[in-house]
Amino acid sequence: MKYNHDRLVQAKRTIALVSACSISADRAMEAARSIIGGTVFDVRLKEVERRVVWRVKLLRDGERVKVYVDAGSGRILDAKAEIAVAEPYHGTSPETLIGGHQPAPPHSQFEPDSLSTPP
């Protein structure tokens, strides 16, 4: 029953957010692309600091950029570059990195006896 209650609460919250929107996700994506450029790969309706916004994520020149578009006016509020797309480690396929599982960096070779201990 808790699962159904949680889903109902989430649905009501989503309805409230959508009701507060004056612009569509398509218009938010257009606004973000016109200013930032790149390719949209995620759009979400969120509430940030008591303001309903569309968060549009774009991929541009090897970096991910988050753009926050006011859901009422369509005005761009903020844009933040997240990360540069890193080159894969040697010997690792891109498919491994896409799943978010990056290999650990090579282990450093040290001898435990070579560590100094305080007197």
Image (cartoon, grey):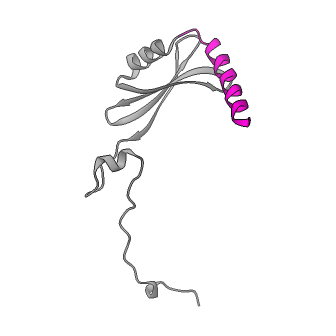
Quadrant in the picture for residue 111: bottom left
The residue most toward the front is: 1
Side (left or right) of 18 relative to 63: right
- Image coords of residue 105 (percent x, y): 37, 62
Side (left or right) of 48 relative to 82: right
Compared with 63, 50 (above or below) is above
At a point 35% along the width and 42% down the height, the residue shown is 85
Compared with 72, 14 (above or below) is below
The residue most toward the left is: 91
Compared with 36, 112 (above or below) is below
- Image coords of residue 104 (percent x, y): 40, 61
Q: Is residue 20 visible?
A: no
- The question of residue 15 being in magenta is answered with yes
At a point 41% along the width and 14% down the height, the residue shown is 30
Q: Nearer the viewer, residue 19 or 63?
A: 19
Q: How many marks?
A: 0
Q: Is residue 42 visible?
A: yes
At a point 37% along the width and 31% down the height, the residue shown is 59
Q: Nearer the viewer, residue 90 or 115?
A: 90
The N terminus - image quarter: top right
The residue most toward the bottom is: 119
- The question of residue 2 being in magenta is answered with yes
Q: Nearer the viewer, residue 117 or 98?
A: 98
Quadrant in the picture for residue 81: top left
- Image coords of residue 47 (percent x, y): 63, 25
What main secondary structure does the magenta stretch of the protein show? Answer: helix
At a point 69% along the width and 21% down the height, the residue shown is 12
Quadrant in the picture for residue 73: top right
In the image, the segment drawn in magenta is 1-23
The C terminus - image quarter: bottom right
